[in-house]
């Protein structure tokens, strides 16, 4: 009797659905063992070197060059992806043309294609004798085995983030605002810049942030096309693997931690920008 | 509604399609063109090589071991996040999505820091003659880490949208937790679940950076397909490298096709109108 009434109270407290304790327990165990404990190791191990040692290990010219390349190339690639992603999202939402579904599926290709495969394909494509590398080379533009190649690979992997972030917002955008602007005598370009673009800004920023974060940590699609010349086209994740091969665990963890903090800082900044934009 | 005037519309569409062809289609075509550069026979021979066969078997094994873990974890997470209200729910969801914003190399590095020769548990493992890094367990752990959020993030929004009324009714009628899940919840989420599992599997089979760090690259033993691609490429066996890459590309294309089909299926189910 008493047990039944406690059970009834528990049911009311949690709603009638069973399995809260069990599912939460499994979730926390899964999250803790796979994600939290390993990331704790990343947060703790660099400090074996001491604060001075961590700073010294990060201040090596080769490390700074690699962090700078990963950071700047992913920022540039995410920035270039903004207009490209916006354009692709626009035709997918606002236009009807044969092959639209195919284009829609193709957008997700960089998500689905294994990064090593993307790396090989982009290298073959942009190599000096490749389909795109040859004509670009004739114009004096060298892509493969240069920092530009790093940017191209990051452009490829980041593209779907911007398209998929903008698409739903653009679809739900009420057309009345555009019509009103047109009625009030705005031309098409003014309408796009003053009405449509501001409404898409949060989605664009979110897509930019995701593309940037992906580019910053990207490895497989970059290392083949980069050429990996120290100080020139060597990315930060590659430096982690090099330090691991030398059994410099703490040094590898220091670079990893620096990359994570760099990513979080820029994501927080973008988050803050989004809120500030909305509050305005 | 004023229609977009004709020629600016065509220019916009033309530029968009050109970009899609250059940025997305050309890399895809390149894979197959390079694989078939000397015809079909050399490509097939390359795939039949013993080391490549071993890599294919290992890839299947790693995926078969890691995908179920994240499927069960994802289901449990979706159940407690979508069907109950408790403090810290948002934080829990954010932590589950965290592995997506971690570099693949870091996803491998964390396991080396724990279980590598100089890792926290390295000496203990060595004393007991157990090997995790440069062996199958390390490959599986790294793969579980990078594919961690797929199932949970497909299910949570859908199950939140469906609410709790059906489950509450089942519970009131005396159904146990498992009965409620299998008879009430699962039929409603099965297509989304399948889609999440497929995406998880595709990433598990295609992962490169994380497994590269923990693999040790022992030929015929710890090389998955993407790692085999890298080795063949670095040995200038380009046709063979692109042949294995083409296999992985086919997997990606099948996954994309299945996902599109499932989404159409799910969409017609969720919105009968």
Image (tube, rainbow, N blue to C red):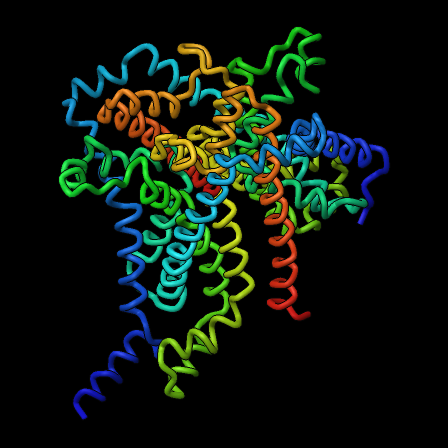
Near-viewer residue (A108 or A241): A241
Near-viewer residue (A34 or B272): A34
Residue A102: quarter of image: top right
- Above or below, B251 relative to B79: above
Q: How many marks?
A: 0
Near-viewer residue (A96 or B205): B205
B95 sits left or right of A188 in the view: left
Near-viewer residue (B257 or B116): B116
Q: Residue at position x 48%, y 23% from top?
A: A223
Q: Residue at position x 39%, y 52% from top?
A: B65
Question: x%, y% of residue B57?
Answer: 47, 45
Question: x%, y% of residue A168?
Answer: 60, 49
- Is residue A79 at all visible to an observer of this figure? no
Question: x%, y% of residue B265?
Answer: 64, 63
Quadrant where the C terminus of chain B sits is bottom right
- Above or below, B86 relative to B143: below
Q: Residue at position x 57%, y 26% from top?
A: A120
Question: x%, y% of residue B238?
Answer: 59, 23
Q: Residue at position x 74%, y 36% from top?
A: A186
- Which residue is situated farthest in the bottom direction here? A1
- Above or below, A153 relative to B62: above
A166 sits left or right of A8 in the view: right
- Is residue A222 at all visible to an observer of this figure? yes
B10 sits left or right of B195 in the view: right
């Amino acid at each position: 009797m008493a047990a039944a009434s406690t059970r009834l109270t528990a049911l009311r407290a949690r709603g009638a659905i069973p399995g809260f304790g069990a599912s939460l327990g499994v979730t926390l165990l899964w999250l803790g063992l796979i994600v939290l404990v390993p990331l704790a190791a990343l947060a703790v191990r660099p400090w074996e070197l001491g604060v001075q040692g961590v700073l010294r290990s990060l201040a090596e010219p080769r490390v700074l060059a690699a962090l700078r390349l990963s950071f700047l190339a992913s920022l540039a690639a995410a920035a270039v992806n903004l207009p490209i992603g916006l354009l692709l999202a626009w035709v997918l939402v606002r236009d009807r043309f044969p092959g639209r579904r195919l284009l829609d599926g193709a957008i997700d290709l960089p998500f689905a294609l294994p990064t090593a495969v993307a790396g090989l394909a982009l290298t073959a494509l942009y190599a000096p004798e490749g389909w795109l590398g040859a004509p670009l080379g004739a114009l004096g533009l060298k892509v493969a085995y240069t920092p530009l190649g790093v940017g191209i690979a990051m452009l490829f992997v980041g593209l779907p983030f911007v398209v998929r972030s903008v698409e739903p917002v653009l679809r739900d955008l009420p057309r009345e605002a555009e019509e009103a602007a047109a009625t009030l005598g705005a031309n098409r370009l003014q309408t796009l810049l003053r009405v449509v673009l501001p409404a898409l800004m949060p989605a664009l920023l979110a897509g930019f942030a995701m593309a940037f974060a992906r580019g910053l940590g990207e490895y497989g699609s970059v290392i083949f096309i980069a050429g990996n010349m120290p100080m020139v086209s060597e990315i930060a994740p590659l430096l982690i693997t090099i330090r691991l091969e030398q059994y410099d665990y703490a040094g590898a963890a220091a670079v990893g931690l620096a990359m994570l903090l760099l990513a979080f800082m820029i994501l927080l900044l973008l988050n803050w920008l989004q809120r500030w934009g909305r509050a305005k | 509604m004023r229609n977009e005037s004709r020629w600016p519309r065509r220019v916009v569409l033309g530029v968009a399609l050109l970009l899609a062809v250059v940025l997305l289609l050309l890399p895809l075509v390149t894979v197959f063109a390079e694989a078939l550069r000397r015809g079909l026979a050399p490509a097939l021979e390359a795939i039949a090589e013993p080391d490549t066969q071993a890599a294919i078997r290992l890839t299947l094994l790693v995926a078969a071991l890691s995908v179920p873990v994240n499927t069960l974890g994802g289901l449990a997470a979706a159940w407690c996040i979508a069907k109950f209200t408790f403090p810290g729910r948002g934080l829990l969801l954010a932590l589950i999505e965290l592995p997506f914003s971690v570099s693949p190399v870091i996803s491998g590095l964390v396991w080396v820091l724990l279980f590598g020769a100089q890792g926290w548990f390295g000496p203990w493992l060595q004393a007991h003659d157990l090997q995790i890094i440069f062996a199958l367990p390390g490959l599986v752990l790294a793969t579980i880490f990078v594919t961690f959020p797929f199932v949970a993030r497909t299910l949570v929004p859908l199950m939140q949208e469906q609410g709790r009324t059906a489950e509450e009714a089942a519970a009131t009628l005396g159904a146990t937790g498992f009965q409620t899940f299998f008879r009430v919840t699962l039929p409603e989420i099965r297509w989304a679940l399948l889609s999440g599992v497929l995406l998880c599997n595709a990433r598990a089979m295609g992962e490169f950076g994380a497994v590269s760090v923990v693999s040790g690259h022992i030929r015929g033993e710890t090389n998955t397909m993407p790692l085999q691609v890298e080795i063949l490429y670095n040995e200038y066996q380009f046709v063979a490298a692109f042949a294995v890459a083409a296999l992985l590309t086919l997997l990606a294309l099948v996954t994309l096709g299945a996902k599109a089909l499932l989404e159409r299926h799910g969409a017609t189910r969720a919105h009968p109108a």
